[in-house]
Image (cartoon, rainbow, N blue to C red):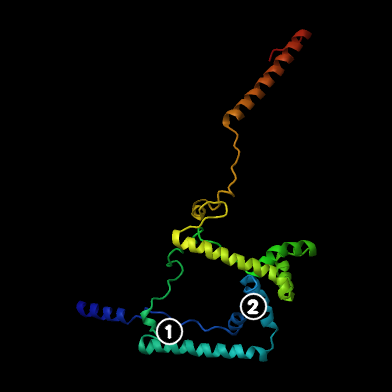
Amino acid sequence: MVGKENKSSKKEEKDVYTGLMPKKALTGYTIYFQDNVSAYTDKGIKVSEAMKDISKKWMALSEKDKAPYQKKNEEDKKRMQKQLDDIEKKGYFILDDGSKSCDHSPKKKKGEAKEKEKKDKAAPKRPSTGYIFFTSENAKKFAEEKQIAYTEAMKECGKVWNSLDDKAKAKYERLADEDKVRFERQNAEYLKKGYYVMADGAKSSILNTTGKSSKSRKSKVVKPERSRKSSSKSKGKDVKEVKKGKKAALQDLGEDISD
């Protein structure tokens, strides 16, 4: 009996599906968001800020305008259900690349996942776009001049940037091109050596240990202990001298100075 139970339990273990599970069906809003978010991120606007604006636009859409996205949602639900049915019947479903889902390991759950690799601080900073250079120059100015929050100033930058012609944008696009060259040069050196030489002449690998370049590290002036002690001693001497002076004055007056 024991032998039969062991065989049956092993068979059950083999039947357990351990491959990738189908992706959850996307909602109509998620599909709408994916179609529109790049228009914001291309201008350097954070996804969190873009999400707020896209959400408002979605809410303002009529049912007719939402219909194409809701239709895609229904199609995606069918896709998910079919893949679940395939797992039940065949033990796998076919992925977009043509491979079987059972041949792939599922992503580990939160808590089981390995600790994410820390970002290498020695790597060069990615190049900025012309729009980023424009906002870096104007966002703070807009916030101060119009007395608005920085996030609102960023939105204002987006509006102004879109209204600029190619001639007005040329200055910032030129800076972006120069920054691309800088990145490519530093990245080539980084991939070859594991670091690149920064503007202050230090190796970028120092950032992994200090977080700052040698130029930005300011040496703190620390007063030696001796000087602090000597200053306290001098204060003590001054107090004693004052007390002696008081005693002498009282003795001259013939007063009792006993404690």
Which amino acid does the dot numbered 2 rest on?
Answer: Ala
Is 259 situated left or right of 119 in this image? right
Above or below: residue 229 compared with residue 247? below
* Circle 2 residues within 10 Å: few <14, some 14–19, many ≥20: few
Residue under label 1, please give it: 97
Question: Residue 118: in sight, yes or no?
Answer: no
**In which image quadrant can residue 71 be found?**
bottom right
Q: Is residue 96 left or right of residue 2?
A: right
Name which residue type carries label 1. Asp
Give the image location of residue 211, x and y in percent.
Answer: 54, 53
Relative to residue 258, is residue 197 drawn left or right? left
Q: Nearer the viewer, residue 11 or 35?
A: 35
Q: Is residue 165 shown left or right of residue 9?
A: right
Please tell me which residue is depicted at 76% across the width and 12% down the height of the picture: 249
Quadrant in which the C terminus is drawn:
top right
Q: Quadrant of the N terminus?
A: bottom left
Residue at mark 2: 39
Kindly state the secondary structure of the residue where label 1 is placed.
Answer: loop
Q: Is residue 175 visible?
A: yes
Name which residue lies at 61% across and 25% down: 230
Q: Position of residue 158 (x, y in %)?
A: 70, 72
The answer to whether 214 is drawn above or below residue 140 in the figure is: above
